[in-house]
Image (cartoon, rainbow, N blue to C red):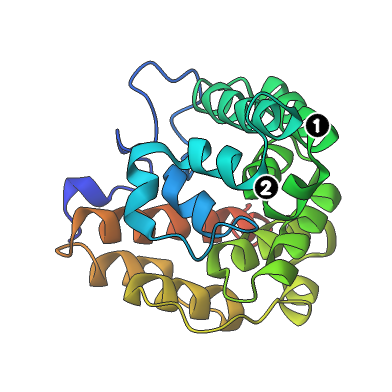
């Protein structure tokens, strides 16, 4: 049996604040700033460890945005991420859209915006956002999966699987397994069980995406 940490309804503190206003079932993946920065234009070659200190400050410096629109856009993204954590999804989307107005370069990398669109049931726009992100970085495993999640709500699972965005192999074993499950079909409970005694982050990803897999196929489980 999976450990209690692997329950599909878990909300790890590292991804959601303790006072989150989101419903317990809405487990929302919020990756760290360095993950975002590594995929952003012009900063991909900067050593990753630098982003642990100040990802957005580096972005501003490299884009010449200190005090200008680029910096304001980065601030809007940070604000949007905070609002998302707090459960203010509509407001988070407004901030992400504002960031794009301030600095259009941001749009191709705003996976955060795609999450907001998904949870606002704006699935077509969410799919477009994730497809744009994958077009810029063909190794974005999670964005590929989130595109599928959006399109499964529009077209159904079978058609969404035909449209599945193939990406390069992920260095994380758990995400390779998750990717294959969404792409080819699989058993989410087996996925959770396999990583139940793994590192907490792997257990989290397995549990999160198992829950999302069930969500994508909800019609198959309705009585």
Q: Left or right of 102: which side holds 211?
A: left
Q: Nearer the viewer, residue 32 or 17?
A: 32
x, y percent for residue 59: 56, 44
- Residue 188's tag is none
Q: Nearer the viewer, residue 199 or 102?
A: 102
- Residue 110's tag is 2
Of the image marks 1 and 2, the number of the one nearer the N terminus: 1
Q: Nearer the viewer, residue 190 or 162?
A: 162
User: What is the number of callouts on the image?
Assistant: 2
What residue do we see at 33% from left, 44% from top?
52
What residue do we see at 48% from left, 84% from top?
169
Compute the Cα span from label 1 to label 2: 13 Å
SS label for mark 1: helix
Visible residue check, residue 26: no
C-beta proximity under 8 Å, tags 1 and 2: no
Q: Left or right of 157: which side holds 57?
A: left
- Compared with 212, 162 (above or below) is below
What residue do we see at 64% from left, 70% from top?
137
Quarter of image, res 32: top left
- Compared with 116, 23 (above or below) is above
């Amino acid at each position: 049996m999976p450990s209690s940490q692997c329950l599909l309804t878990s909300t790890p503190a590292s991804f959601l604040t303790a006072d989150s206003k989101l419903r317990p079932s809405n487990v929302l993946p919020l990756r760290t700033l360095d993950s975002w920065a590594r995929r952003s234009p012009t900063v991909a070659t900067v050593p990753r460890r630098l982003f642990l200190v100040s990802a957005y400050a580096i972005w501003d410096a490299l884009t010449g945005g200190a005090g200008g629109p680029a910096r304001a856009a980065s601030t809007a993204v940070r604000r949007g991420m905070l609002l998302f954590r707090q459960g203010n999804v509509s407001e988070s989307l407004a901030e992400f859209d504002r960031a794009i107005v301030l600095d259009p370069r941001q749009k191709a990398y705003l996976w955060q915006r795609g999450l907001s669109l998904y949870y606002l049931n704006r699935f077509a726009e969410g799919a477009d956002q994730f497809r744009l992100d994958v077009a810029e970085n063909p190794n974005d495993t999670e964005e590929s999966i989130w595109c599928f999640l959006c399109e499964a709500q529009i077209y159904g699972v079978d058609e969404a699987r035909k449209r599945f965005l193939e990406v390069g192999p992920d260095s994380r074993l758990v995400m390779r397994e998750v990717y294959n499950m969404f792409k080819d079909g699989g058993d989410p409970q087996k996925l959770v069980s396999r990583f139940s005694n793994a590192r907490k982050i792997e257990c989290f990803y397995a549990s999160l995406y198992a829950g999302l897999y069930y969500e994508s196929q909800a019609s198959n489980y309705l009585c």
